[in-house]
Image (cartoon, rainbow, N blue to C red):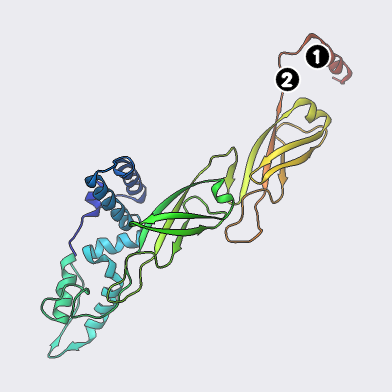
Amino acid sequence: MQYIDYYKILGVPRSADVKTIKKAYKKLARQYHPDLNPGSKEAEKKFKEINEAYEVLGNEENRKKYDKYGKDWQYADEIEKAKKQAESRSYGKRHYTYTGFEDAGAFSDFFEAMFGSGASGFNTAHSDVPFKGADYQAELELTLTDVFREHKKTLTVNGKKIRITIPAGVEDGQVIRIKGHGAPGTNGGPKGDLYIRFHIVNNTSFVRKGADLYLNKELDLYKAVLGGDVYINTLGGKVKVKVKPGTQNGTTIKIKGKGMPVYKRKNSFGDLYVTYHIRIPSHLTKEEKTLFEKLAALRPS
């Protein structure tokens, strides 16, 4: 396996934090996206390289393995296991003492010594040890109304279409695992997994905090003073709410069970909190102004 400098591909230093890596990935992914570069083989190749780089550097565990083992990062767990075995086992007349890989090439050298000349990592004719395939990382952008209900979506991963079920209530930044949809295993090993990170775009007037939703609602002065019924939009449809007479500006009410679905808890919902903002009438007619003056005179000072 040829060594690929993923940091160079994304144009970030090795000291870059997660936010910087994500920002660089998004910028390059937009620049080289096949939809924006129709028919360009170069852009298609670059787009695949960018995604491959982010699959590694965008995942904390994968990045640690890559920083330590370079091109052989996918076999980090197996390397550690083999290291322990190599410290205490003899092979024929030779005894191997392992003190740590100082560079990416050391992995191949180490196993060449163990399995014989011509060995190159684990993927050789001299080794029949099965290894799990690499995990894939992907991002999926959805709207708040998308995740109000469970739904199915078709994704294209490495040229293959897969249909997944997205549970209701998924939150921004949440990661879910789709088992067995990563890279093929080696020597009959299982496939890796697909990890999907969700980016939820709020396309509503609600503010989301966990499973609860918050909404500002204008209330006319007369309704606030006299009380009555108002209709409030929720993600599940309109609901009728009674306004108490004498409702003050800034009053917040709770509408139970009209928030977001709670992730993977069937028939469980957060609440909707509505804050009233009283609208003061302007451009009064002469008659309206006279009536307000009469009302003011009736109120004790």
User: On the rendered image, what quadrant is the N terminus found in?
Assistant: bottom left
Mark 2 vs mark 1: which is more N-terminal?
2
Instruction: Please give the name of the residue rendered at 64% of the width and 39% of the height, measured from the top-left corner.
Output: 215
Q: Position of residue 180 (x, y in %)?
A: 40, 68
Instruction: Please give the name of the residue rendered at 51% of the width and 59% of the height, measured from the top-left corner.
Output: 165
Label 2, label 1: how many angstroms apart (C-alpha)?
10 Å
Tell me if 293 is positioned left or right of 271 in this view.
right
Q: Which mark is residue 103?
A: none
Q: Position of residue 296 (x, y in %)?
A: 84, 17
Q: Are marks 2 and 1 in contact (CB under 8 Å)?
A: yes
Q: Amino acid at mark 2?
A: Pro
Q: Quadrant of residue 190?
A: bottom left
Question: Foreground residue, 60 or 238?
Answer: 238
Crowding around mark 1 (Cα neighbors within 10 Å: few <14, some 14 to 19, many 20+) is few
Tell me if 171 is positioned left or right of 188 in this view.
right
Q: Is residue 224 above or below residue 200?
A: above
Q: Secondary structure at mark 2?
A: loop
Q: Can you identify the residue that label 1 sits on?
A: 288
Q: Position of residue 140 (x, y in %)?
A: 44, 51
Instruction: Please give the name of the residue rendered at 42% of the width and 54% of the height, measured from the top-left corner.
Output: 155
Q: Position of residue 134 (x, y in %)?
A: 32, 65
Tell me if 175 is positioned left or right of 145 in this view.
left
The answer, for residue 209, to whether it is visible in the render is yes
Q: Is residue 179 above or below residue 83?
A: above
Q: Secondary structure at mark 1?
A: helix
Tell me if 160 is positioned left or right of 150 in this view.
left
Q: Can you identify the residue that label 2 sits on?
A: 281
Q: Amino acid at mark 1?
A: Glu
The total of numbered circles placed on residues is: 2
The answer, for residue 15, to whether it is visible in the render is no
